[in-house]
Amino acid sequence: MNIANFSQMLSFIKPELAVSVTILVVVVFDLIFNKNKKIIPYIALLGIVVTGYYVIQQYALSGTAFPTSGKYGMVTVDAFASFFKMIVLIATLCIVIFSYYSDEIIKTQGRLGEYYTLIFGMVLGMFVMISASDLILIYLSMELMSLSSYVLAGFTKLRTRNSEAALKYLIYGAISSGLMLFGISLVYGMTGTTNLYQLNAALQGADVNLYTVGFALILIFAGIGYKISAAPFHFWTPDVYEGAPISITAYLSVASKAAGFALLMRFLKTTFVTYVDPHGSWQLFNIFDWQTLLILISVLTMTLGNFAALWQDNLKRMLAYSSIAHAGYMLLGVLVLTNKGVSAVMFYFFVYLIMNLGAFFVVMIIANKIGSENIDDYDGLGYSSPFLGVTFGIFLVSLTGLPPTAGFIGKLNLFVALLDKQMVVVAVIAVINSVVSLYYYIRVLKHMFLTKRDEKISIPVPMPAFLFILVMATTTIFFGIYFTPITSWAQNAAAILHF
Amino acid sequence: MNGFPILSVITFLPILGMIIVLSMPKEKNREVKIATLVITILQVILAVILLANFNYSLGGINDPKSFQFVEKFRWIEIPGISWIGTFKVDYYLGVDGLSMAMVLLTAIVTFIATLSSWTINKSVKGYFALFLLLDTAMMGVFVALDFFLFYIFWELMLLPMYFLIGIWGGPRKEYAAIKFFIYTLVGSVLMLLVMIGLYFSAKETLADGSQVYTFNLLALMNPKNYTHTGLLSPLNADNIRLIAYIGLFIGFAIKIPMFPFHTWLPDAHVEAPTPISVILAGVLLKMGTYGILRISYPIFPEITRQLMWYIALFGMINIIYGALVALAQKDFKKLIAYSSVSHMGYVLLGMASLSAVGINGAIFQMFNHGTITAMLFLIVGVVYDRAHTRGIYDFGGLATQMPVYTGVVIVAFFAAIGLPSLSGFISEALVFFGAFAVTTTRTLAIISTLGILLGAAYMLWTLQRIYFGKLNEKWANMKDLDLREIVMFVPLMIIVIYLGIYPSAMLNLLHASVAHLTNFMAQHAQSFLISSL
């Protein structure tokens, strides 16, 4: 490998390098300015801006780098990857703002350096995951991300729930990554390669046992399914989401899910697609019936998430189940196996990022004051804090998927992708699910606006937090009425690099 | 109306009102009410201007040229990538005779409901803001000609309605509000699926000659626009068009409400505050039948023809069942709610005949039901405000105590029964003429006439129990109507009497559109069928 070639390859991982540098800077600052930790969030913001610059710069780039053997590399850069990196980055930006206002995190002031180091560790893991086109790299990036998030889930150490969450997360995570590694080893044993592009060719050479391949692929899927909290790999989600600090819960529900979906879609398209027809439909070669598996998982995930959410009285737990249900909706976009589906998922992620983080932020601001996430403590909040009440209402309506909010357009895109493939039954199940979801979202509104409480509690909202919520709520409505830019962006970026 | 976007103004004026109301200080209750009243009066004036400039000879329905006050521009356009094609949604508003009648009704009923809202004293600002938002959504549904836009307005209605029932309602308001919400949402998601299905089935030819998938309702009515492979294309051999029709129909039927989807209505009515009941009965229920006439009928003419007997059957069940249940009620408001179910049955029956007379009668009945039932709910509101009870047996002999009020009651009740010279008579008569003339629906029409008898029975019996007989001493001090209440009844009474004596005022408005609709359906039922051969 010559030097020129190497530096050219480095340009493929500029955002990842920027994240790594941020990690180092945070660590160094943490050591030097031992007394004053206030500066660390600003370093984090700076790191995000720089990384964002490189991600945007990379947008036009497409290709692979760091080949192990042959011409296909371990890292793939394309518009699709840039889109998801941007989603992760925006989510990270929001989480820095979250952490700045979160009482839970403020209480751990002394360990703020660790906190941001771990967050950026996760970002690095997710970035690599989004770009990875080699099973080994996929595995490593998932581990990098998971290990950081295990620690973060138990970071505050304030409650036993906290440690319980971290431990549960760790155990489930260890098992699923073990299964995945086993699957990868089987695939490697059969084909002699771990590179996704080479696997595509190797698996088409029909000299493999279909059952063994199916078994191995299901094992690999278990690892990914765990990350996107798809049923039946979702059991950790409610406990972890409830126990973890709320900023981390919010982060897990959006960013790590985004990375998981990006990985799933890249894995499917790169490894199993022979060609893409002019209508954007993927033609998979005949080795494993992904569509049926995904339909089952998707229907199971959304139904389970929605029905379990009906009985929750803790809002964090309710939002956890709701995020499982949303993973089910987003799988709808994957299971159609078309470009249209991919762009629908991407659009949905953008919308989901805004509305879900908005909802979590409001829950956090309220929890800061009243110290509880229980739905009964929300009684009459709509009157004592009308701003929080109304904006939370907007986020919940958007999560339900009613017009004129962005959540509706997101769901519409998914249903459009489904009906385009004439999957009427799945579409009917999905819309019935969204009716069910209405009940638990609206229940929160009921407590806030329909139930009165005598004592008045006023919840202080600092100005920047107020602006943050306002921006999130306005964008939720705005993209519900005028969504052209996001849709075009998602459609243009939906082309996953594929040979 | 040279270039003046009157439909946009009439639709979005309430949003402007909402912003004004929200920006007012909290304690200015009276000013908030006056601001809302001004907005709704302006809306009535705009509706009258529309009517004055309306050309009665243009049909509308599927012909873009004969829609009036049209506003059309591209709202959303996402230039296509090879695999997706252009995605476009038009902001497309326009009225024909059918929607003109509904726009008038909406403007009038909203104005009356605002007057009736004067007694609201709890969170006044919030109430009127939501009220105005609801107003925009209702108006929007009646003027939208693009399915996507229609759907947005349709759904926009749900949230304000949920809160209006849920916050300002009676003792079981939360239950009623969520029930209303969930029922309606089930209907609208079915509609959403059909909407997407239709989108993928037909292509509209744009001015520049390119063909794109479309939500344009008018383009969806043309069988030539359907692609061969489309999901809901007439060429599709499966019965998918039938299934889609039924899905769409259920979506609308829940709103009407048609038996067996009617159970949300009594709850919602009983719990809702009077003005919201007025809006609900006066305007919201009409959206169901309006949707069927505007969307289901012209887009699926061949299936409508196939299912007309069933539609009439459900109409008949609504008429008889609603009336029977109304007979058994002890709660005045619940009785009126079930009478609504019965009266909407006439609309279904008239529509099902697919004859010009029957459909004329159905739309006329929609308008009349809107005005008459609004009066009935206001009447209930008047006694409830004074006595805080609605039990029919709690009253008696109110006529001696409140002569003016009883006069209004008699007019409204007789209009509801369908006494000649009041508007209800004409529309019910037309419905029966229409349904009787067509062999398919004749038997059902004959059975349905029982409904008139039952209607007279429960109405007159109620009249007797509440207003005549011995005065219950408890209510000896009940005051007669005050000026505000008289102002709220008078316009409705004038309309009911005027249209009873001179029904042509409304029928002329409807005539061209209905004639166009029936001709068009007769013709296209054929071409939809032929193209499937």
Image (cartoon, rainbow, N blue to C red):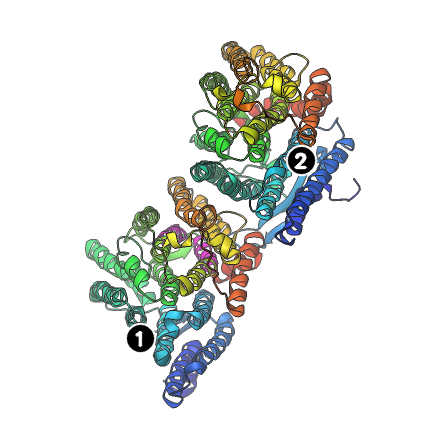
**Residue A103: percent from left, percent from top:** 40, 70
Q: Can you see residue B511? A: no
Judging from the image, what secondary structure is the residue with disc 2 in?
Answer: helix
Identify the chain of the residue marked 1, using the numbered disc in the image: A
Name the residue: 55% across, 56% down: A479
Is residue A331 on the magenta stretch?
yes
* Amino acid type, callout 1: Ser
Toward which corner of the image does residue A227 lie, by quadrant? bottom left
Nearer the camera: disc 1 or disc 2: 2
Q: Can you see residue B407? A: yes
* In the displayed structure image, the side of residue A175 where residue A29 appears, left or right: right
Residue lying farthest right?
Answer: B2
* Residue stretch rendered in magenta on the structure: A325-352
Toward which corner of the image does residue B157 lie, by quadrant? top right
**Residue A398: percent from left, percent from top:** 48, 52
Taking B253 as reference, is B433 above or below it? above
* In the displayed structure image, the side of residue B100 where residue A402 appears, left or right: left
Q: Which mark is residue A69?
A: 1
Identify the chain of the residue marked 2, using the numbered disc in the image: B
Main SS category, magenta section:
helix
Q: Name the residue under label 2.
A: B111
**Residue A499: percent from left, percent from top:** 40, 64
The N terminus of chain A sits in image quarter: bottom left
* Amino acid type, callout 2: Phe
* In the displayed structure image, the side of residue B62 where residue A444 appears, left or right: left
In the foreground, B67 or A74: B67
**Residue A191: percent from left, percent from top:** 24, 65
